[in-house]
Amino acid sequence: MNIFTKILSILAIIFSLLIVFAFRFQKTTVKQSNKLVFSYVSYEYGKPLQKKAEDFAVRRIYEVYDNKELKVIDKIYKGYEVTTDIKLDNKLFKTISALKNINSFRTKIKLEEGKYYAGAYDYIAVWNRNSKEELCFITPLVSDKLVKLINSFYDIKLKTGKQETLTETPAEVGLYKVSIIPIHKESYLPQITLPPPSL
């Protein structure tokens, strides 16, 4: 009888462990099924911000998923800071989900004569069902609507999410580099130029 009781206890423990593992697996599977609907990258490419003409560096990445969660990757000194599990408000998520024909946001082809731009480049990608749209730009050449949308991300309090500091480069940085550089080269963006020194 004692042996039978022990067997039942062992089976109960095994059954409990199976339930726990199944729950965790299901939770992981659900989380992995979340799909990207929008991404934004602030980046540097070429001279004079980089030492070599082909150098590419990410400043910040925003990724929005279909479960209304935001992931942020920030370049910091000697590494990256990754923030996850940030919930977007319904209004911002609805605006992002409705984005399409993003190339129409570009309102100018080039900077005005005598104007200089020494900031970073920008990239956005939008997923609509099975299609993907991408755009490389600088803020002086696009509509105020897009600039306002990008600025709204900077107002989000990242402390509400889970933060982790990485010393190694996240895989996302390499993936975006592969995606962005060909589009950047076809976008006729002005070279980053520091203004001439004042007399």
Image (cartoon, rainbow, N blue to C red):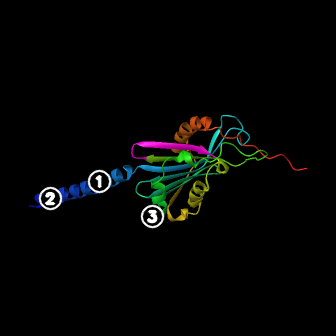
Image coordinates of residue 187 in percent, x first then y, are 61, 38
Front in this rendered view, residue 14 or 85: 85
Say whether residue 130 is magenta. Answer: yes
Disc 2 marks which amino acid?
Leu
Image coordinates of residue 96 in percent, x first then y, are 48, 55
Disc 1 marks which amino acid?
Phe
Q: How crowded is mark 1: few (under 14 residues within 10 Å), some or many (20 or more)?
A: few
Residue beneath disc 3: 90
Say which residue appears at 52% left-offset and 43% top-offset: 134
Say whether residue 107 is magenta. Answer: no
Secondary structure at badge 3 equals: helix
Say which residue appears at 58% left-offset and 63% top-offset: 155
The quarter of the rendered structure image containing the N terminus is: bottom left
Say which residue appears at 48% left-offset and 52% top-offset: 99
Disc 3 marks which amino acid?
Asn
Q: Residues within 10 Å of mark 3 (few under 14, many from 20)?
A: few
Residue beneath disc 2: 8
Image coordinates of residue 63 in percent, x first then y, are 50, 52
Secondary structure at badge 2 equals: helix
Quick one: label 1 or label 3, which is nearer the N terminus? 1
- Marks 2 and 1 sit apart, C-alpha to C-alpha, by 20 Å
Whether tag 1 and tag 3 are in contact, CB under 8 A, the answer is no
